[in-house]
Image: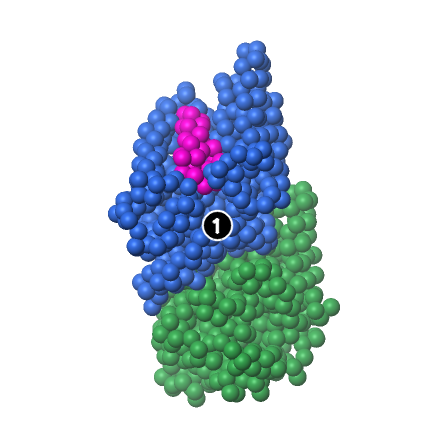
Amino acid sequence: MNPGDALRILPEIILTITGVLVMLVDASLAAGTTRRPLGWVASLGTTIALWASLWQLSLPAGTGFYGTVETSPFTVFFHVLICGIVLVVLLLSLDALPEETHHQGEYYALVVFGAVGMCLLTGAVELLVVFIALEISSISTYVLAGYRKHTGQGPEAAIKYFLLGSFATGFLLYGIALIFGATGTTQVYEIAHALASVPNVPNLPLILASLALMLVGILFKVSAAPFHVWTPDVYEGAPSPVVALMSTAPKAAAFALLLRVVYEMFPTLRSVWSPLLWGVAVLSMTIGNLAALRQQNVKRMLAYSSIAHAGYLLAALAAAAPDGIAAAAFYTAAYAAMNVGVFAVVALVSGYDEDLPLIQDFRGLVFRSPLLGGLLIFFLVSLVGIPFTGGFFGKFYSFSAAVGAGAIWLAVIGLLNSGLAAAYYLRLAFSAARRPDESSAVMRMRSTPAGITVGAALLFAAAATLVLGIAPGEVLHAAQEGAHTLQPLEEPQPSAPMVLDNRNGQ
Amino acid sequence: MNDSILTIILLAPLAGALVIALLPDRGKLPAWIALLTSLATFGFTLHLPAHFDRAVHGFQFEINRPWIENPAISYHVGVDGLSLWLVVLVGLLAPAGVIASWNAIKERRKTFYLLFLVQQTAMYGVFISLDLIVYYGFWELSLVPMAILIAMYGRKDGAKAATKFFLFTFIPSAPLLVAILWLYAKTGTFNFTEVQQYIASGALPAGALFWVALAFLFAFAVKVPMFPLHGWLADTFAEAPVAMAMVVAGKLGLYSMLRFHVGLFPVQARHIAPLLIALAGVGILYGACLALVQRDFWRLLAFAAIGHLSLIVMGIYGFTLTGSDGAIYQILNNEMIDAALFVLFGALELRYATSQIAAYGGLAAKLPQAATLFVISSLAMVGLPLLNGFIGEFLILSGTFTGVSRGWAIVGAIGVILSAAYMLWLVQRLFYGGESELARTKPAIDLHFAEQAILWPFAVLMLVMGVAPSIWITQIENRIEPPVMVSAAPALHPSMTIAVSREGRQ
């Protein structure tokens, strides 16, 4: 190990220091003192980590710590995205968490520690480090999910998430064990090298089993069908700012891992995982959208919508590298911007205790507060995928990658699904746009003006959604840069990526 | 000026919207800004016919600048004889829309006029875009302000009508986007002219092109709307604010048919033309018959619109020069007459608070101005010689008679006769006959100055367009016809020569 290796995990180091600092100061403060400044400390630390990630671009791309972590444009893209999401969520929490909430200090520390895990997950190229990073990020989200202890749903959400989540992580670990048994290594590049001559490799059944198990573990984390059942309950029980975080940042990290696993570790098994992911994509979109249509609770509806969005994103993986990787990376960014935004509005409107959980409770929001109502509609329109918003270009790149790879039917199913999805997004949007009547719950909304930090959070999310919709060039360029660093060692055999073409091309 | 005029037209309403967004929602301030903006924009649009060069064949006022590198999307705009007057029409209708909303919109004026202006930009965008993705962007964008305003200001159940409208028009655009992406995957460009050349060269498989053309057609047919895809129209007319209802049907879909279906896929369009003419024939009779039995004047106008729009479709797919000239001319007439009727109906509903035809009667003596203008507009609509409706209908019918079949021309003529029946009957029931309860009890307030200021010029224009159609027709005839064969193409336009020779080299 050389001392320069520390620079490879500089954002993680900064975030860890911040988290420890927040916890220590929290413990030394007298009971009853406001913990709000700790949120500022966490935000500051995250901002520095964000800059550190950007600075890492000036490092030569490569690995450190004996080939266990990597810095490349790909990891920087996801580091910046995750730090950005965490920063916005921290800003949102500063105002959305009520002053009297217990354990505020721990809340900020947990968010920051979660960020450490997620960042490490995107940079890890050694499967045990991957596993550790995933655990760091998961454990903090398990705890955050149950933060509203006084409600029945909070602990329920946490326990459900924890049980199912640890089960899924078990799958991943089992997959890692099998691949180690089959190839004798847990380093991603070495595995890829060992698998270069598929199908003429020893232990092929073990390797296929390992691929399947690892996919199960990762697809659980991105809440893709059929591993999605935890999502609605957890989202409903967790506080809205936490949902804003856990529906975007850990998913972005998990998608980064998925891209690494399929494109970098198993590129030669494309003919195996590609149809699998095709099926998962179609299943996720369809199940997510059909279930969301029937929801009355806003957060459950958005939970199912996030399942559908995982499906749209997976559609990009029908394409070969680097197009598929770039499209998927762009989608995570676009989805994060609009989803954090929509949950921020929900958090503000329904409050920490969620007095207004139902869609009809939002009736008249535009008349009650034009700005919040307008922002809600804007984010929903972006989720629908209307042009000039980030959501459109997310879908556009994803499905154009799919069409480019010949998966016409995947694109048709996906876009018809997004038409279906419009129905439930619009139910909320039009509910907000309708004239309020006497029974409108939204009229009872607390009238204190929203704080400056939550304003900044909303502004940030709205600006990101708009910029991704009008000038997506820069972000796409970054995603493409990243995609090029995530190339398989050997080009896959020409026959492998043709599977989809043969099936759907004509 | 010539270079940037289209950009100015496109952005002027958006700038007005921005000003409205920044200023407070006080009294009629937003309405004034919207009025000034739309008048100014109308002034800009008049620059186009004034400087349109009839000698030049091809798109004029063209701008083609790269917007996004990969995939290559360009800000590519331009007008030809087809879109020229449609742009002016949008400009003309905007002040009419503002004035129709002047007293009708009483709350949240800021939101209303802001979205109204965004809608204007979207419509200009549809008519001038020559890049398929930019076109698609504006096409989708035009749905959003419309749907939100219907939801906000619906008369009875706006949210339901808005959802119906949005889904009806959004879901068919999913196959449209897939079709555009497929064309891009095959041709590598979104540029309208290049795609047109590529398709004309016959390099694309005919089987796939059939489906692609069908996807384009389907999206447009719903938007027009054509029988049997008209389910959304009546509810939308009955619920939408007047200023929105008068732009929702007709021109966007019909223009898109001409430009992007007939224009891009002439061969496929010719194949499917008999079916479309048959559907148009059914639509003419269906719309007229249902208009005869409506009790609500908004719904009557909706079914009348289906009949009239079907007649235009018949003109488009007859593939005769007379017929398509007439069709384009009739789009202008139809939109103008409908707009005048919408303003008048809106004025009546504002004064008497009902849209039930039976409640009215004997208003002519009380509201002489309204009665006169209503009669003029109705006569224009039924195609009385010397008024504009006559020219368009005559051209379409004579084109159909000579170029398609006598049978369908007779069906069209029956539709014209039926439309005379329901319109004149409507005039009789609203304005003549015995004095109704309504006319006796409610105070009679004739059209105020602003309404007259918009309606009299419309009436004059109907007369001018009826007696001197050549002013318009000559410019309309200077439009880009779909290239029939590659060998004929170089003679048409220099840019085509380049495209063809580039292709030859490959």
**Quarter of the figure that contains the C terminus of chain A:** bottom left
Task: Identify the residue shown where x is 38% and y is 60%.
Answer: A493
Q: Position of residue B299 (x, y in %)?
A: 43, 60
Query: Any magenta on residue A138?
Result: yes
- The segment highlighted magenta reads A117-146
Q: Position of residue B458 (x, y in %)?
A: 61, 68
Q: How crowded is mark 1: few (under 14 residues within 10 Å), some or many (20 or more)?
A: many
Which hue belongs to chain A? blue
Closer-to-camera residue (B23/B158):
B23
Task: Identify the residue shown where x is 42% and y is 32%.
Answer: A132
User: Which of the colour schemes (rainbow, by chain, secondary structure, one colour) is used?
Assistant: by chain
Residue that numbered label 1 is attached to: A486
Query: Any magenta on residue A479?
Result: no
Q: Where is residue A287 in the image (x, y as percent from the top left)?
A: 32, 46
Which hue belongs to chain B? green
The answer to whether residue A289 of the structure is visible from this angle is no
Closer-to-camera residue (B202/A20):
A20
